[in-house]
């Protein structure tokens, strides 16, 4: 037996993961011995069939090798086997002269990981309970007060979050910021950086949902001169390199494309990266902080987020509560925002006392971002130096839609249709506005900037209306 064949045979037979080797027609060439227990068939029986037959018989639900044959791209998905076990599988094509000759797939039985997941969840709960029970002495509370800079933290919930971040800041452990859109994850990530030993280094913020897929790798990893058409002559360091010695903050990490999840995982594991068009790897040293408003565990179950990356980033999870659960923070946030508006517009406006019942009584589903937008709208709609009744949200939506409509090449309807309600009208205008911007702007980030809303909100609206960016424009 050739030495390379013996090496491959040893890898397949001793691996803890379950390997399948399939040819370009779907014929199973080899499987690891442990696969029999998971898939309910002997190794010999599996090698005597095809992945098409295995999928048809329900042994593979679905077959990841068939997914690779259909798309020609690496894939990762959740499988339910014929024995009822849940596994996470990934597969990669092996091409020769542009044709897929082999597909190498490996799967891991999540049933075997359930104990570890339960143990991990228990440790996280104990850690959280310990922080809640811990007493911050006067000196620690005083230090926190002095070190919060511009953050407005008055509620007990947020003080616990801030104290936790301050305690973990000196270490380099990855922090996962969780919370609804607009709760202030970026602000707290910056504060964590200021508390860390890397405070003198850069803080590099990346919105994973804002960079077009076709530019993601070159933006994140950088490129060498001549790596692709349009590349600069001197090449460019990517965002990962730019974070050297500092903190890399990946916002909306749930939007990270699957192929980039794989590449990011390799950087985290190895501490090295390779620029586009380069053959030399470079060492990188940064502290990773990530944030999301999504349930990453659910995305793992859906097969859209890598399980191994999930465990890599979910080292110290920190949940920022929504504004409705920490109303004590509202006065400080309002005061800070009002000072900023007065500086920006060169006036000294004050809030009328009647406004406070509105500010303290609303649920603020958009959290701090919505509060800031509401205050700016109130500031601009008040003629004098006293801010009282701002434009109502429904009136503002209609006004904003009509203002944006002026930019469209074709005029939008300005009158309600017969028996058409205001929400129906606004929905119709919103769809027309978004459809026009999808044709004219290159990304959801650009649309969000034009409309003055968050990028995730744009994504949700496009999905609701069945719209997409015109890539050919």
Image (cartoon, rainbow, N blue to C red):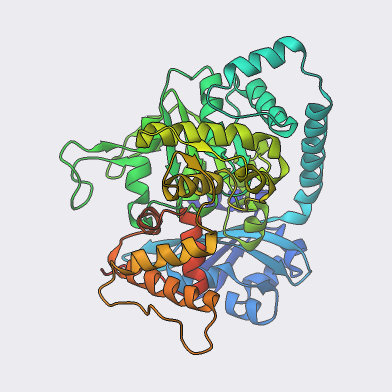
Q: Nearer the viewer, residue 304 or 16?
A: 304
* Residue 86 x, y percent position in the rendering: 73, 62
Left or right: where does residue 322 sit relative to residue 449?
A: right
In the figure, 238 relative to 392: above or below?
above
Residue at the (20%, 46%) spot, across then down: 231
In the image, residue 199 lies at what x, y percent? 48, 19
The picture places residue 472, in percent across and down from the top left corner, at 27, 70
Residue 142 or residue 352, whichever sits in front: 352
Residue 367 visible? The answer is yes
Q: Return the x and y of residue 371 as percentages of the image width and height.
A: 56, 45
Q: Residue furthest left?
A: 233
- At x 54% / y 59%, what residue is drawn? 392
**With 355 as the anchor, is 128 left or right in this view?**
right
> Looking at the picture, does residue 353 appear above or below residue 195?
below
Can you say whether 362 is above or below 311 in the image?
below
Quadrant in the picture for residue 433 = bottom left
Residue at image x 35%, y 59%?
443
Q: Nearer the viewer, residue 395 or 121?
A: 395
């Amino acid at each position: 037996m050739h030495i390379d064949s013996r090496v491959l045979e040893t890898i397949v037979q001793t691996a803890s993961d379950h390997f399948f080797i399939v040819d370009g027609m779907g014929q199973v060439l080899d499987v690891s011995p442990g696969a029999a227990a998971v898939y309910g068939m002997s190794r010999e029986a599996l090698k005597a069939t095809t992945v098409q037959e295995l999928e048809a018989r329900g042994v593979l639900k679905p077959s990841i090798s068939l997914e690779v044959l259909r798309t020609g791209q690496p894939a990762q998905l959740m499988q339910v086997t014929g024995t009822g076990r849940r596994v996470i599988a990934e597969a990669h094509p092996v091409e020769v002269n542009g044709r897929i000759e082999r597909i190498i797939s490996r799967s891991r039985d999540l049933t075997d990981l359930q104990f570890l997941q339960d143990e991990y969840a228990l440790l996280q709960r104990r850690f959280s309970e310990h922080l809640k029970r811990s007493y911050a002495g006067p000196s620690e509370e005083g230090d926190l007060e002095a070190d919060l800079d511009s953050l407005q933290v008055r509620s007990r919930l947020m003080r616990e979050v801030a104290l936790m971040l301050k305690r973990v800041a000196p270490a380099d452990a990855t922090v996962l910021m969780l919370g609804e859109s607009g709760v202030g994850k970026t602000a707290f990530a910056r504060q964590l950086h200021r508390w860390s030993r890397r405070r003198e280094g850069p803080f590099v913020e990346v919105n994973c949902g804002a960079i077009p897929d076709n530019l993601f790798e070159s933006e994140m990893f950088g490129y060498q001169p001549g790596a692709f058409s349009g590349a600069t002559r001197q090449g460019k360091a990517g965002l990962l390199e730019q974070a050297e010695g500092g903190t890399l903050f990946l916002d909306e990490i749930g939007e990270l494309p699957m192929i980039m999840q794989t590449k990011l995982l390799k950087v985290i594991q190895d501490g090295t990266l390779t620029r586009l068009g380069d053959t030399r790897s470079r060492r990188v040293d940064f502290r990773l902080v990530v944030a999301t408003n999504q349930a990453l565990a659910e995305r793992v179950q859906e097969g859209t987020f890598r399980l191994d990356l999930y465990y890599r980033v979910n080292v110290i999870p920190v949940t920022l509560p929504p504004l409705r659960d920490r109303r004590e923070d509202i006065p400080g946030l309002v005061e800070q925002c009002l000072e900023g508006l007065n500086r920006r517009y060169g006036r000294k406006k004050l809030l009328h006392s009647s406004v406070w019942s509105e500010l303290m009584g609303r649920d603020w589903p958009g959290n701090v971002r919505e509060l800031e937008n509401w205050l700016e709208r109130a500031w601009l709609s008040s003629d004098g130096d006293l801010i009282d009744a701002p434009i109502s949200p429904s009136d503002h939506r209609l006004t904003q839609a009509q203002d944006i409509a002026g930019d469209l090449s074709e005029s939008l309807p300005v009158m309600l249709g017969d028996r058409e309600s205001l929400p129906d009208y606004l929905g119709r205008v919103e769809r027309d506005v978004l459809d026009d911007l999808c044709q004219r702007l290159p990304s959801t980030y650009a649309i969000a900037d034009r409309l003055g809303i968050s990028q995730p909100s744009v994504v949700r609206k496009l999905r609701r209306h069945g719209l997409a960016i015109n890539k050919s424009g």
